[in-house]
Image (cartoon, helix red, strand yellow):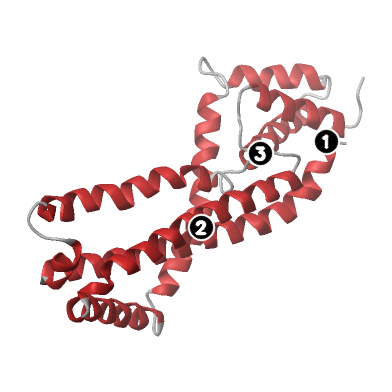
Amino acid sequence: METDKTLTPQQLRNIFDFCKKWDVQYVDLRLELVDHIAEQITDIRKKEPDQTFQQAFHKVYKSFGIHGLNDVVEEHQTIVRQKYWGEVRRGFVSWLKLPRILGTILSLALIYTLFRQFPQITIPVFLVILIVFVWAGVYFAVKSRRLSKQIHGEKTMLLSTPVQYAWVFYFMYWIPIQTFYISYSSEVSLPVFAQTTTGAMFLAFFVVATLLFISINAKLLEIAGGQVVEMKKRLQVFFC
């Protein structure tokens, strides 16, 4: 009979591998589930000392119900996502405070004025913004891959952000351009469009929003880097 109710590294690896077989691809989410399942197994074995690890594990698995681990995965995925976006919200709130918000408003006003007064810079500005956006996407992808290698090639929810970069690029660039500019393209060019009040406001907002979007992704990647440092130690027990 097992007298020590503390889970061994091998038993924790068994839970970790079980979660991986359930196609829980994000390792941070998988670790949350390992903690959740291990805690339940420990509680069962404390209340029922005769229970072995396998028996307690089977009880926990049965408690998941007809949908198995899926419901638990969704629940913890929401918890993890809320934790991450809480960091982003705190950063966004700090952005809304002086002097950043004032700087953003002044930037919008400056870019708006430049487009109105010097419409010939519109196309070069957009080319620069496009190059910066693509460069940022490549940088985020490369940085994410390097961070992933530090945790045995595993993915985290934060490190998956650059994967969606191309989709965000589509929704941020092509849909607004189609909506606000292409409808005018048969009659006016982009520089002429920039000379209108609506056009200059849209283009100024578009430039600033793009830079803010890149800043948010950079913040997420910074948080992911700190997460990887902490996770490396924890993952040693599962990859030894």
Residue under the point 51% across and 36% down: 75
Q: Secondary structure at mark 1?
A: loop
Alpha carbons under labels 2 and 1: distance apart: 34 Å
Task: Say if residue 92 shows up in the picture.
Answer: yes
Alpha carbons under labels 2 and 3: distance apart: 27 Å
Q: Position of residue 36 (x, y in %)?
A: 65, 36
Q: Is residue 76 left or right of residue 104?
A: right
Pointer 2: what residue? 135
Residue under the point 60% across and 61% down: 222
Image: 186 above or below 53: below
Q: Mark 2 or mark 3, which has the lower sequence index?
A: 3
Pointer 3: what residue? 27
Q: Please state which of residues 135 and 7 is positioned toward the viewer in this rendering.
A: 135
Residue under the point 21% across and 74% down: 119
Q: Is residue 66 left or right of residue 60?
A: left
In which quadrant is the N terminus drawn?
A: top right
Residue under the point 37% across and 74% down: 96
Q: Position of residue 146 (x, y in %)?
A: 69, 50
Pointer 1: what residue? 239
The reply to whether dot 2 and dot 1 touch (C-beta < 8 Å) is: no
Q: Quadrant of residue 69?
A: top right
Amino acid type shown at disc 2: Trp
Check disc 1: other Cα within 10 Å, few if <14, some if 14-19, many if 20+.
few
The mark lying in front, picked from 2 and 3, is: 2
Report the residue that reaches farthest toward the left. Answer: 187
Amino acid type shown at disc 3: Val
Q: Is residue 115 left or right of residue 141?
A: left
Q: Position of residue 108 (x, y in %)?
A: 28, 76
Amino acid type shown at disc 1: Phe
Image: 145 above or below 24: below
